[in-house]
Image (cartoon, helix red, strand yellow):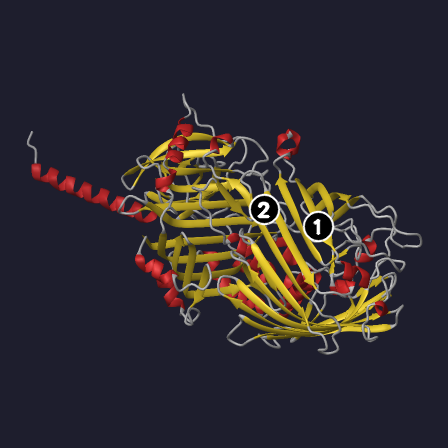
Amino acid sequence: MVVNHNHIKINLYILGLLLLCAAGSNAQVQPVLLKGRVINYFTNEVIPFASVRWKRDSYGAVTDSSGSFRIRKTRFELDTLVVSYVGFEEAHHPYHAKKDTGELVLTLPEVKVTGGVEVKSKFNKGLRWWRSIVAHKKENDPYQFNSYSYELYNKLELDINNLNRKSFDSKLLKPFAFVLNNIDSTSETRPFLPIFLTETISDYYSSTNPYRTREEIKAALTNGIKNETVMQFMSGVSQKVNVYEDYITIFGKEFISPISNIGDKFYSYHGADTQTIDKQKFFHLFFSPRQEGSNTFSGDCWVNSISWAVQRINLNISVTANINFVNKLSIIQEFRQLDNGKWVFSKDKFIADLSPLKKDKLSFIGRKTSTYKNVQVNLPSTTERLSKNKIKEEVVVRDTAETHAPDFWEVNRHEPLSRNENKVYTMIDTLKHMPVFQKYSNAFQFIFDGHKKYGMVEIGPWYKWISGNQHEKLRLRFDLGTTTKFSQHLRLFGYLAYGFLDTRFKGKAAFSYNLNHHESWNFSGSYIDDLDNGRIRYNEDDDATTDNLFSQLIRRQGIRQKFLGVKEFKGSVTKQWPYNLSTQVSFTNASYETYGPLPSQTLFSLNNNGVINTEAIFKVRYAPGEKEIATHRRKIRIKGLEPVIEARYAQSLPDVFKGEYSYHKLSLQLSQTFRIPRWGQIEYLAYGGKYFGDSVPFMLLEIHPGNEIYYYNKQSFNLMNRFEYISDQYAGFNVEHNFEKKLFNLVPFMRKTKMRQFWNFKAVWGDLSRPNSRFNVLEFGSYRLKILRGRPYMEIGTGIDNILKFFRIDLVWRMAPQFTPPPGSTVPNNPQNFGIFGSFRLQF
């Protein structure tokens, strides 16, 4: 048999060509590999080293350090991708070969928050890893250096969560149905809608000792719904977190870090797998709370096997953490290693889901992402740059920051915008130009803020329109003020009131002006002709008065109301200086009228013209660490942790505008809020003052603040009546210690509750000089003004806070000097020595 070798070769070539063509044809119809990414549903962050496998075709793959994967396609047209990762719920994603032709984005549900993480091992290597991390904290802490400089990219977003598509069929929301086209969601059952987005690119400088920060914003892009509530919430989201600290403060609440020196008392640690990332070996450590009720996290971190530095950490607050309105909160931090082996921050992400209602109802998600480029440490140029600061934390916005074109942002932002972030700018612009949206926004603001705007003017607050008291019976009041549409710098405001029993009109007219281009200078003036309406003295600028709809409903029984009639002209100039120092010079001319049962003003008039006084006042306030949110109506102060000092000096001006009295007075006040690690928060106020001068009527002296309603007042003595005690020299303090859940956590069945416990103590010592005592004729009249005579008046209290997230109950005991009024006096013989008070507030 003769074999034709040439014929065999030709046949083999033809067969190989046919196989190649067939393979090429199949590659065009159905690629061999399927690409995708695995992300966290809540944080939108990638999940590295997650397991991805086919349910029907039993093979799989693992995501890389960037969360990406490549997996051979299933043989079946319909199959399911199963995604799993230690600490997460397993997720199942249906796959259709003909429809799913692009890159897939697979999501894992929220992290498990109960039961911990089960990793079988003969010994607890996770606890050993934790000990090694703690032992090397000092050299790995990215905030160990004296100074830093870097380019900072900040992205801050606010989304409406849990939108229900069916709701847009209602008459109320139908005009906004177009927003459904802008909803971005990885889960159609729980879509969210972005409504606010701001981006900034800055040169950032900071030093640790002394603490200084300087941010020079080079580019800024902002769009969305902006109001006071949004700004305050965003302020909470913007806080910095350092996981290397033992305790982390979030929304004013203290959380214990999983790498705290005492972490093993609060966390269970579990060591999982080991992975190689960029040719370095990393350990995967999981942690979960040891008991319910403590402010702790669950999550995981990747730890460098040589330096024991944290390369990436994910923190999720526990369900029973003592924080209000927060459904979920996640913090992701990433770090990178410098050429010298030291670790610095690379990326921070803070995500909070807050709901004022129930967990699954409408809520808001705030997301803040910070990325850091060109991080440099301990450079002399950083110190030189910080020397330009006028305050500890200074932000400078360049004139050209908001003028950059979209192309600039495409090139210079540190990471691209997601699909829903890209839609914010056009969608919000549409909403803001919809009349029905403006109508709804104004209605919402009117209900909760009390004011309603009509172009250049606004009315309100509505809760002061109707009130009542013993002197006026029914009282009607109407307020009117200008808005920023009238002027960005000048505000005019005032009110007109009428009492039906005394048949008198009363009112106020005032202005406030911020000097153009110099908002650190403020000029203000006012004229008021009204009752004093329960104003107290320690916090004159922010007092809550009693002329509102609710005050008469909660008055303490058996106490007659006492009023002063005041006619006052006042003018002031305020200057904000560097480092949160402010000064104010003011001038007042006031005449006073008393009403029964207070002593008649005729007893104190030196020239039979009534009580007329002219006074010049100089005030200095130093508030380091305090931040302000400025609105057109007022400034909202956000306290820092450092003491606030305020000093006042006043000098009467006799014979100026008929002023009759000669004296000068000095007062000093110190206040602070700070935390004791693991033992809650302490607030204190210490104050004192002295008057120099004789023949000063009681309404110009120190009237110790009393409270005659059942609503608890932190600034007042709540079992002291108004005008009960007067002094011309005094000293006192208020202190409150909120344990939060420290004591309740000792009782197992109380650990799930969010109620908090506190105690407080208030005391004041006072006296009145003999000349002023004689001048105020304390021994005459039906209402006897009292003197402490150097003895203390004290109140001690305790109670429960955060009842149903809003309410607080105070139990208060009074300890006061004994006083026996003479016959005929209207001062009660048996003052109330115990009382129960209530109050409510929004708090995290």
Please tell me which residue lies in front, 30 or 645. 645
Alpha carbons under labels 2 and 1: distance apart:
39 Å
* Secondary element at image label 1: strand
Question: Which quarter of the rendering shows the N terminus?
Answer: top left
Category of crowding for the residue at label 2, using alpha-carbon neighbours closer than 10 angstroms: few (below 14), some (14–19), many (at least 20): many
Q: Amino acid at mark 1?
A: Val
Residue 318 percent across, percent down from the top left: 55, 38
Instruction: Give the residue at the far top of this rendering.
Output: 122
* Earlier-in-chain disc, 2 versus 1: 2
Residue 50 seen: no
Residue 582 percent across, percent down from the top left: 55, 65
Residue at the spot of label 2: 326
Instruction: Give the residue at the far front of this rendering.
Output: 770
Q: Amino acid at mark 2?
A: Val
Q: Would you say 466 lies left or right of 746 here?
A: right
- Residue at image point 53% right, 38% down: 296
- Is the residue 664 above or below the residue 34 in the image? below
Residue at the spot of label 1: 764
Category of crowding for the residue at label 1, using alpha-carbon neighbours closer than 10 angstroms: few (below 14), some (14–19), many (at least 20): many
Please tell me which residue lies in front, 688 or 582. 688
Residue 198 seen: yes
